[in-house]
Image (spheres, rainbow, N blue to C red):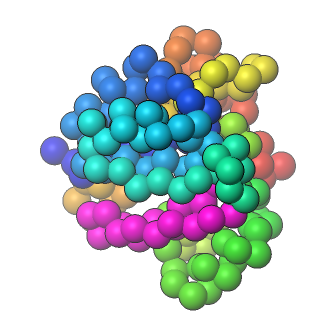
């Protein structure tokens, strides 16, 4: 069975009813900010070990950085990137100090999966209350053999199409 990391962001105080099933059996969970309260983190910790970073709606700046190594994968976790091609100075400085394989971020509520050089930039979109026509989704990072891959999982039927429509808009 592959090594699996559940990725979630922008819950805004709500743990979607499908998250426990989707994340069942994951080895670790990453939350990229705008958590919305300690009850969200408590619910996620019931599923798997958790690494999180606060977002701008969590009485923080959203520029905080957390680092972790999970199954050999080096992750930089932040809330506000804002764009992979033009990352914020706090992200650039952190990557210069210590490289990462993945940069996981939130804030925009837009799904994103893009590799730039050696770094994969991944935003799972929002798992919180629906916002406009944006998807409600989470992400998964899996290791099978030596290769890592990431993908999005829609949490409702409408979000299947919304994921396709909004994917990688941060690169446009």
Using the image, determine if residue 69 lies above or below residue 43: below
Q: Quadrant of the N terminus?
A: top left
| Closer to the camera in the image, 141 or 89 | 89
Residue depicted at x 31% and y 63%: 70
* Residue 152 location (% of width, % of height): 50, 36
In the rendered view, does 56 fall on the left or right side of 29? right
Residue depicted at x 72% and y 59%: 61
Q: Residue furthest left?
A: 1
Q: Picture quarter containing residue 118?
A: bottom right
* Residue 88 location (% of width, % of height): 76, 68
Using the image, determine if residue 109 lies above or below residue 119: above
Residue depicted at x 61% and y 32%: 12
* Residue 3 location (% of width, % of height): 24, 51
Say if residue 24 shows up in the picture.
yes
Residue depicted at x 40% and y 20%: 18
Q: Picture quarter containing residue 34?
A: top right
* Residue 74 location (% of width, % of height): 41, 70
Q: Start and end of the magenta stretch?
A: 63-79
In the rendered view, does 80 fall on the left or right side of 97? right
| Closer to the camera in the image, 54 or 72 | 54
Q: Picture quarter containing residue 20?
A: top left
Say if residue 121 shows up in the picture.
no
């Amino acid at each position: 069975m592959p090594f699996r990391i559940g990725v979630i962001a922008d819950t805004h105080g709500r743990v979607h009813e499908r998250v426990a099933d989707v994340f069942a059996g994951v080895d670790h969970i990453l939350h990229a900010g705008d958590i919305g309260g300690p009850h969200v983190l408590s619910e996620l910790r019931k599923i798997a070990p958790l690494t999180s970073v606060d977002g701008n709606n969590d009485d923080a700046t959203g520029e905080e950085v957390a680092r972790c190594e999970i199954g050999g994968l080096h992750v930089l976790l932040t809330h506000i990137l804002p764009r992979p091609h033009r990352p914020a100075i706090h992200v650039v400085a952190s990557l210069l100090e210590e490289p990462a394989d993945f940069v996981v971020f939130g804030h925009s509520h837009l799904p994103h999966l893009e590799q730039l050089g050696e770094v994969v930039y991944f935003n799972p979109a929002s798992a919180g209350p629906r916002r406009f026509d944006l998807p409600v989704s989470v992400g998964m990072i899996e290791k099978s053999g030596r290769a890592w891959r990431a993908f999005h999982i829609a949490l409702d039927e409408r979000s299947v199409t919304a994921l396709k429509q909004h994917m990688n808009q941060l690169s446009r």
